[in-house]
Amino acid sequence: MTYGAPEERVRRGAAGVVWRQWPLLLVLGGGSLGLLAVALGRFRAGCIMLGAAVLFAALARAILPARRVGLLVVRHRAFDVAVLLALGLSVVVLAIVVPPAR
């Protein structure tokens, strides 16, 4: 007999590891896509995607409880959110401000 809601049940194996780390996987996936776009010559779009991934990490850290956000927990919630917001906003603003290549 199992107790709790379906999302509260313990998942075992590789699927359980992936399920528990979904915020980190989304951030890594978005960052990887951004870096790929930069490598393919789309500097501005890639940097904005990279910054958006970091801003998503800040949002996930702010909203989700520590047991759900997984490896995005580094220090206290306020510190993590402040650092991620500063980094994400900086990357996005710099991507917008940098003049295009000639």
Image (cartoon, rainbow, N blue to C red):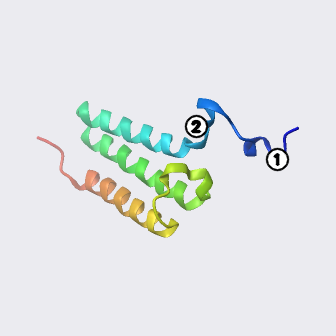
Q: Quadrant of residue 19?
A: top right
With respect to residue 18, does 90 lie above or below? below
How many circles with numbers are drawn on the protein?
A: 2
The answer for how far apart the CA atoms under marks 2 and 1 are is 19 Å
Q: Earlier in the sequence, mark 2 or mark 1?
A: 1
Residue 12 is labelled as none
> 19 or 95: nearer the eye?
19
Left or right, 6 with reference to 21: right
With respect to residue 12, does 68 lie above or below? below
> 25 or 56: nearer the eye?
25
**Is the residue marked by circle 2 packed among few (<14), some (14-19), or many (20+) residues within 10 Å?**
few
Q: Residue placed farthest to the right in the image?
A: 1
Residue 39: x, y in percent? 24, 33
SS at circle 2: helix
Residue 81: x, y in percent? 46, 63
With respect to residue 62, does 45 lie above or below? above
**Is the residue marked by circle 1 packed among few (<14), some (14-19), or many (20+) residues within 10 Å?**
few
Left or right, 64 with reference to 48: right
SS at circle 1: loop
Q: Which residue is mark 2?
A: 17
With respect to residue 76, does 67 lie above or below? above
Left or right, 25 with reference to 11: left
Give the residue type that dot 2 points to.
Answer: Val
Q: Which residue is mark 1?
A: 4
Residue 102: x, y in percent? 11, 40
What residue is at 50 percent from the left and 67 percent from the top?
Answer: 76
